[in-house]
Image (spheres, rainbow, N blue to C red):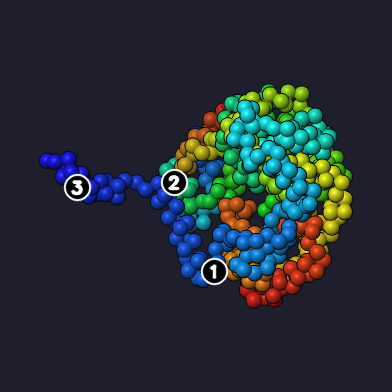
Amino acid sequence: MSTRDETFAKVTDLIEPFNKKGIPLTDAVRFAQDLEWDSLTVMDFVAAVEDDFDIIITMNMQAEIETIGQLVDAVETLKAAA
Amino acid sequence: MTDAGTLREDRPLDMLEHASAPDLLAKFDPLIAERQALLDTGVRDPFAIVMEKVLSPTEAIIGGKPTILLGTYNYMGMTFDADVIAAGKTALDEYGAGTTGSRVLNGTYQGHRECEEALKDFYGMDHAIVFSTGYQANLGMISTLAGKGDYIILDADSHASIYDGCWLGNAEIVRFRHNSVDDLDKRLGRLPKDAGKLVVLEGVYSMLGDIAPLKEMVAVAKKHGAMILCDEAHSMGFFGDHGRGVAEQEAVLDDIDFVVGTFSKSVGTVGGFCVSNHPKFEVLRLVCRPYVFTASLPPSVVATAATSIRKLMHAGEKRERLWKNSRRLHQGLRDLGFTLGTKSAESAIIAVILSDQTQAVGMWQALLELGLYVNMARPPATPAGTYLLRCSLCAEHRDEQVGQIMEMFAQAGRAVGCIG
């Protein structure tokens, strides 16, 4: 498994508790439209991802992230920089 | 083809074009529909109250009926203080209705200076800067202090003016879980050591009325080399020995780099400010856009603010009454069976938590019909998606009014079914 695959697996693990509709999780799934998350869910989830990977995803960055794939790529970049 | 003919023929085409052009207000259709559905059930609009007459800091005429005010943030009841009103009238006579100018051009009068002097004396600090509103104080301070490459670290439950201050600037924005010292510590620890950092805190969080663990948070922020801005909007006048806020009560005021506050709560008028001991503070007057590019407060407003601030320095009796009222109402509502935002009365705000919009509006309207005004708050202004009725006490609420308030809550709560 590549590190991206590992990151994807970890991120989707963290999504599951908030995946109320049981949507199959792929790179293309969008947080707002497909998972129908509100800003409070996003806040809780982002905090969980940050703590799990020991990174910071600034709100500026969050504004650019719409899909699971984009988040996984961002986590990869942030991990590399840390 | 004549010009007139062209015009006539063009008109329907124009309309067609307009009809197919995107309507920028269409994005609000869901909200319009939700609101309409609510109003169709026959309730009054909680966001369209008109006070026809204001009788005192605690009473107004709403819908032709005398109503007790329990949602005004008029904590110290200074709005009708005789000295405050006299100062405003004198300034109106002597300096006119408005300044028509920016603070840095023609909009600084003697009164603005005196108001800043009053703030310096009140907080015992070297510098004070007055903004036209509290919202603009946060907007200006936060966007100016934290620039490109700097980090702002803010509590997730921060007021909209703090969030907007972040978005107005160019800094990186990092949130931590509400009032979590550990979460703040972890996030600060992950940031680049040499980056500029501004931790933004509030003394009292206005939705639930809970206070921040400032002692611990300040220690953590200092450990990581961050500067601290603390918004004391809901604590000025009645926290700490001198009424300087939660930071004074927690004995950490000296470690707060910037205290932001407002005149529209305890002070009883309108305006915002920041006080600081930072030696370079005065430069902000030249570089802070929400300070520079707006008209200054009217002379009557700064005169009322200055008089009120000086009186608040010696308002021990009012402070005691406000705390007594807050504790009594908090206990009374708990005893009635309401779910409240805090276990005990941490501030002068008491948040009654309700299950949904229907119950919140039902309760709000029942109270209004009985003669009590409270604030209704709903997401996204509220944390954790809650619907709540927010009560704020005033030092001038009389004992019998607090008794009446509890009686009205009991009656409305039983009628709506949120208490047994």
Amino acid bearing label 2? Val
> Would you identify the image quadrant in which residue B412 lies?
bottom right
Tell me whether the residue at label 1 lies in contact with that at label 3, contact meaning CB atoms closer than 8 angstroms.
Answer: no
Determine the secondary structure under disc 2: loop
**Residue B138: x %, y % from top left:** 65, 38
Q: What residue type is labelled 3?
A: Arg
Q: Where is residue B8? Give x, y as percent.
A: 19, 47
Mark 3 vs mark 2, CA separation in Å: 50 Å
What residue do we see at 72% from left, 30% from top? Answer: B226
- For residue B280, side relative to residue B380 (left or right): right
Q: Which chain carries label 1?
A: B
Label for residue B96?
A: none
SS at circle 3 = helix
Chain letter of disc 3?
B
Q: What element carries label 1?
A: loop
Considering the image in quadrants, where does the C terminus of chain A appear? top right
Q: Which residue is drawn at 18% across and 43% down?
A: B4
Per the rendering, the mark at residue A29 is 2
